[in-house]
């Protein structure tokens, strides 16, 4: 199969299991007309954005937290307009409330401030990633960045579509920074202080910044993240079984539009046995789901799995 011309710098890869590939390529429904009838669109797909504290780094949202607090406090004088917001952020992010983010207030009750992300890699044939999915003969799906940035959110019941503000982005794509990421934290703090945002908006900006920075120990992952921008910092979600047990997530959807480039450029078949059969099945699946121009490529890595 041959795909159209593309720029490799515009592609990000999502490593997934066989079950994950089937779920991502399952027909996506959307309401149409006044009767809100659900129709499916060929060439569409969905991704699961997971609550980041359930990802593989046990220090998610903690690396860089102290530096962010310093950046927030430095320009804010006691009694000034933003002092209350920064003091509240210090209470939550500084660990004065129960970790990771337990908020005992009338606004939130005991609910945690969840922040969701779908994860991608710059490399579509990376041994460390295949090791994570090798037992299930995984796949790496090559997405166009522009398609990822055009996704919208569905939360709660599979047919409950959340309202979308057309003037505001619902998702945002960021490259993860490893080690020294002072500029990410500084920019977030400046936005919080300069724009005099609400407490909820300030918390979202802080969580988005903290979810972009990780320890240099994870640098080999070459990760990008697609964030779900929940303006209320709390949203109904769905649940799945993950490595830690019950795992909260929200569903992000892409609807194909006439004249737009295909959102998926290629699918890499993970190393292991039966690669020819797995490639043939992937090609058939892609054609049936409206991705007939997507290239299926076997891994070059000699890993048994």
Image: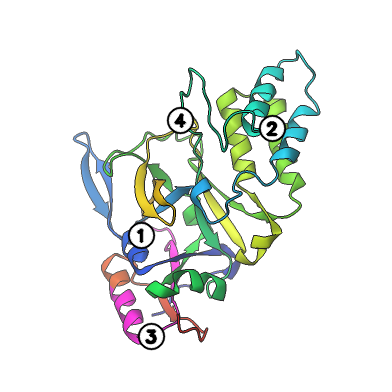
Q: Are marks 3 and 2 in contact (CB under 8 Å)?
A: no
Vertical relation: 49 (above or below) 11: above
Q: Give whichever of discs 1 and 4 has the lower sequence position.
A: 1
Residue under numbered circle 4: 111
- The residue at the point 38 percent across, 80 percent down is 1
Residue under numbered circle 2: 191
Which disc, if any, is residue 24?
A: 1
Q: Residues within 10 Å of mark 4 (few under 14, many from 20)?
A: few
Q: Are marks 4 and 2 in contact (CB under 8 Å)?
A: no
Front tag of 1 and 4: 4
- Residue 246 point in image, percent of width and height: 38, 48
- Residue 50 point in image, percent of width and height: 45, 49
Q: Nearer the viewer, residue 237 or 10?
A: 237
Q: Nearer the viewer, residue 231 or 264?
A: 231
Q: Give whichever of discs 4 and 2 has the lower sequence position.
A: 4
Vertical relation: 255 (above or below) 200: below
Q: Give whichever of discs 3 and 4 has the lower sequence position.
A: 4
Vertical relation: 202 (above or below) 106: below
Q: Give whichever of discs 1 and 2 has the lower sequence position.
A: 1
Residue range highlighted in magenta: 257-284
Q: Is 266 colored magenta in this rendering?
A: yes
Which type of secondary structure does the marked residue at label 4 adopt? loop
C-alpha separation, residue under disc 1 versus residue under disc 4 = 29 Å
- The residue at the point 23 percent across, 48 percent down is 39
C-alpha separation, residue under disc 1 versus residue under disc 3 = 23 Å
Which disc, if any, is residue 273?
A: 3
Q: Give whichever of discs 3 and 2 has the lower sequence position.
A: 2
């Amino acid at each position: 199969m041959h795909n159209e011309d593309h720029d490799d710098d515009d592609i990000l890869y999502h490593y997934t299991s066989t079950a994950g590939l089937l779920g991502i390529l399952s027909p996506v429904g959307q309401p149409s007309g006044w009767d809100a009838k659900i129709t499916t669109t060929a060439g569409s797909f969905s991704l699961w954005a997971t609550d980041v504290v359930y990802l593989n780094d046990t220090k998610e949202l903690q690396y860089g937290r102290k530096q962010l607090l310093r950046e927030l406090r430095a320009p804010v004088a006691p009694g000034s307009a933003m002092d209350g917001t920064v003091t509240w952020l210090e209470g939550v992010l500084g660990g004065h409330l129960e970790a990771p983010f337990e908020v005992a207030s009338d606004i939130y009750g005991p609910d945690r401030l969840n922040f969701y992300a779908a994860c991608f890699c710059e490399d579509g044939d990376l041994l460390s990633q295949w090791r994570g999915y090798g037992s299930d003969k995984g796949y790496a799906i090559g997405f166009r960045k522009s398609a990822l940035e055009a996704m919208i959110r569905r939360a709660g019941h599979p047919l409950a579509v959340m309202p979308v503000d057309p003037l505001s982005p619902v998702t945002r794509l960021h490259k993860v920074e490893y080690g020294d990421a002072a500029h990410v934290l500084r920019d977030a703090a400046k936005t919080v202080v300069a724009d005099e945002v609400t407490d909820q908006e300030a918390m979202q900006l802080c969580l988005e910044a903290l979810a972009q920075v990780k320890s240099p120990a994870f640098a080999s992952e070459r990760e990008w993240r697609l964030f779900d921008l929940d303006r209320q910092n709390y949203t109904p979600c769905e649940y799945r079984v993950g490595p830690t047990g019950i795992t909260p997530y929200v569903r992000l959807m892409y609807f194909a539009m006439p004249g737009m480039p295909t959102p998926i450029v290629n699918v890499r078949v993970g190393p292991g046995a039966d690669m020819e059969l797995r490639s043939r099945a992937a090609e058939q699946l892609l054609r049936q789901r409206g991705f007939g121009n997507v290239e299926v490529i076997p891994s070059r890595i000699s890993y048994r799995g």
